[in-house]
Image: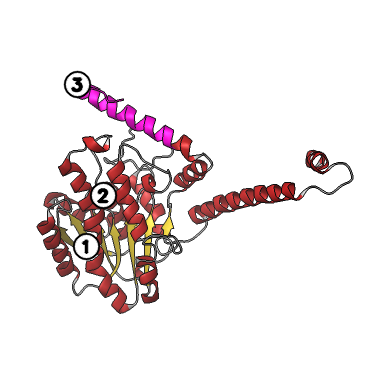
Amino acid sequence: MPQLEEIVSTAGGAGSPPPLWFLVFLALGLHAVVVSAATFLARLYRAFLRRGKDLGLRYSAWAVVTGATDGIGRALALELARRGLHLVLVGRNPAKLSRVSKEAKDAAPSCMVKSVVFDLAGDATELSLGAARVAVAVKGLDVGLLVNNAGATYPCAAYFHEVETPVWEAVVRVNVEAATRISRAVVPAMAGKGRGAIVNVGSGSSVVVPAFPLYAVYAASKAYIDQLLPPSGTSGVSRSLSVEYKQYGVDVQCQIPLYVATKMSPVKGHSPFIPSPEEYVKAAIRCIGYEPRCVPYWRHSVQWFLASLAPDSALNLWRVRVGVRKRNEMRALLGEKELS
């Protein structure tokens, strides 16, 4: 490599070895390149080559899915039914639960379905009673998989002080408290029989970018999900569920989607990086039972890899501009004053 030899010669002088500082920087640079390439290749392997687990064989025949009436939750329930699992569907709308139950039975006639009406955004009493209804519904069932998919966010981008109290309280109740209560309802039986899996649906807002301004409470609530069900070895409350229950045969995982074409997504229109719920869940199911944190959809992995190459300051500036633009667009539609 003539160019490298010229650099070495310039750094150390003709005929003399390169200085130590040059070797150190060269080694650090090569290490960074190798790590980045290995990470990228590992993500491609997980996306295209690694086989998914037989969930019924590995865990058991029943799965609990929250937020099962729309978007990712509905697509996930139908795909699990096609793969031979029976379902306990959790949602707040009885009519939608009935519709998805019928769709699951049509997709897989042998599928048994139970429904639990539970408003995950309800007050403390409703959350307590709803979790109790879930516990009653799963009693006597061999539940091997729980997917905490239900999520809530703001209706539009907003500064922290502008978010109405009922809105941010609902975000916290759905994303944090309800997921915790339902996990507590099913974990004891899984640990007792020595097998099971809990999958929480996180968000790129808490992992892929260093900050997610104008959706602060939502991003913070998803950071809780990521930290409650984290990869081993991280700090904070990371020595929690994934470490606590590994010894009992319970696999705990946080899946990180970026934008998926659901009603919660603020990005509208076609994009190769925004899959349909049906496309996304096929990738998500293949990941269950593997690493404690994963990005199931391969194009989302590409986006995360590219984001990791950018400095935090650039990502923060971009996210602020996007958030403020969306906020001001909505304010303009409502005829309200912009806050720059």
Residue under the point 32% across and 50% down: 222
* Residue 151 image label: 2
Query: Residue 165 magenta-drawn?
Result: no
Marks 1/3: CA–CA distance: 40 Å
Residue extending farthest to the right is: 15
Which kind of residue does numbered mark 3 sit on?
Gly
Residue under the point 72% across and 48% down: 21
Q: Which of the two labelled residues, at mark 1 and mark 3, occupies the earlier sequence position?
A: 1
Query: Residue 332 magenta-drawn?
Result: yes
Contact (Cβ within 8 Å) of mark 2 with mark 3: no
Residue 182 falls in which quadrant of the image?
bottom left
Residue 201, position as x, y percentages in the image: 33, 53
Q: In the image, is residue 39 above or below residue 205? A: below
Q: Decide if residue 49 is in sight here.
A: yes
Marks 1/2: CA–CA distance: 14 Å
10 Å crowding of disc 1: few (<14), some (14-19), many (20+): some
Q: Which of the two labelled residues, at mark 2 and mark 3, occupies the earlier sequence position?
A: 2
Q: Which of the two labelled residues, at mark 1 and mark 2, occupies the earlier sequence position?
A: 2
Q: Main secondary structure of the magenta part?
A: helix
Name the mark nearer the viewer: 2 or 3.
Answer: 3
Which kind of residue does numbered mark 1 sit on?
Arg
Which kind of residue does numbered mark 2 sit on?
Gly
Marks 2/3: CA–CA distance: 29 Å
Q: Which residue is mark 3?
A: 335
- Residue range in magenta is 316-340
* Residue 181 image label: 1
